[in-house]
Image (spheres, helix red, strand yellow):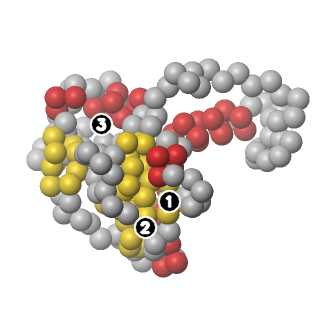
Amino acid sequence: MRAVGYAETGGVEVLQNIDLPVRDPGRGEVRVRIARSGVNPTDWKSRNGAIHMPIPAGRFQVPHLDGAGTVDAVGEDVDSALVGQRVWVWLVAYKRLEGTAQEFATIPAGLVEPLPESASFDVGASLGVPFMTAHRALTLNEGGPKRLGPGALDGVVVLVAGGAGAWAAGLPLCGPPWPP
């Protein structure tokens, strides 16, 4: 399968188009055909070495924490009804060599969330880290709600800093999007 990866840290020049085998999901994993891979600041900070994660000799880091696509296989102990489901995924490359900058990503099932038909894969790929960060910021404050829902933040003033300035977009990996 097509993938983008790097064997050493640095600027964009270290990124390489690579060919990797499609891996079958193991126990508690799903395999997602990635339609869009989301890029976050953590992704390029890891690539340029600002966030250190060693890459074993002879291996590649496939970047990108977030993405969206369709489940095409499940491993043992995962509901087979997920096959064919549209999903968004998050933290895929966290402490792992396998991110979403590839055609198929094998992912722990707990990092896979349903993506409604009304939401595009672009939207799904942009959720992950930004969405989880915002959710935690709104639910971990003293006296704040533990869960979000209608009215949970009534009367609360929320400052959204960088809401239009941060870049976390779902992008095709190489050229036009792959067929669904």
- Mark 3 vs mark 2, foreground winner is 2
Q: Which mark is residue 36?
A: none
Q: Real-space Cα distance between discs 2 and 1?
A: 7 Å
Measured as percent of width and height from the top left, residue 141 is found at: 74, 31
Circles 2 and 1 in contact, beta carbons < 8 Å: yes
Viewport quadrant of the C terminus: bottom left
Measured as percent of width and height from the top left, residue 160 is found at: 66, 24
- Mark 3 vs mark 1, foreground winner is 1
What residue is pinned by disc 1?
87
Q: Residue at x 41, y 73 (%)?
A: 74
Left or right: residue 52 compared with residue 91: left
Dot 2 lies on which element?
strand
Return the disc, 3 or 1, that comes first in the chain's sequence. Answer: 3
**Residue 108 figure quarter:** bottom left
Disc 3 residue type (three-letter): Met
Q: Is residue 119 above or below residue 11?
A: below
* Residue 99 visible in this rendered orientation of the protein: no
Measured as percent of width and height from the top left, residue 110 is found at: 51, 60
Q: Residue at x 34, y 27 (%)?
A: 45
What residue is pinned by disc 2?
71
Q: Real-space Cα distance between discs 3 and 1?
A: 27 Å
* Residue 64 visible in this rendered orientation of the protein: yes
In front: 118, or 158?
118
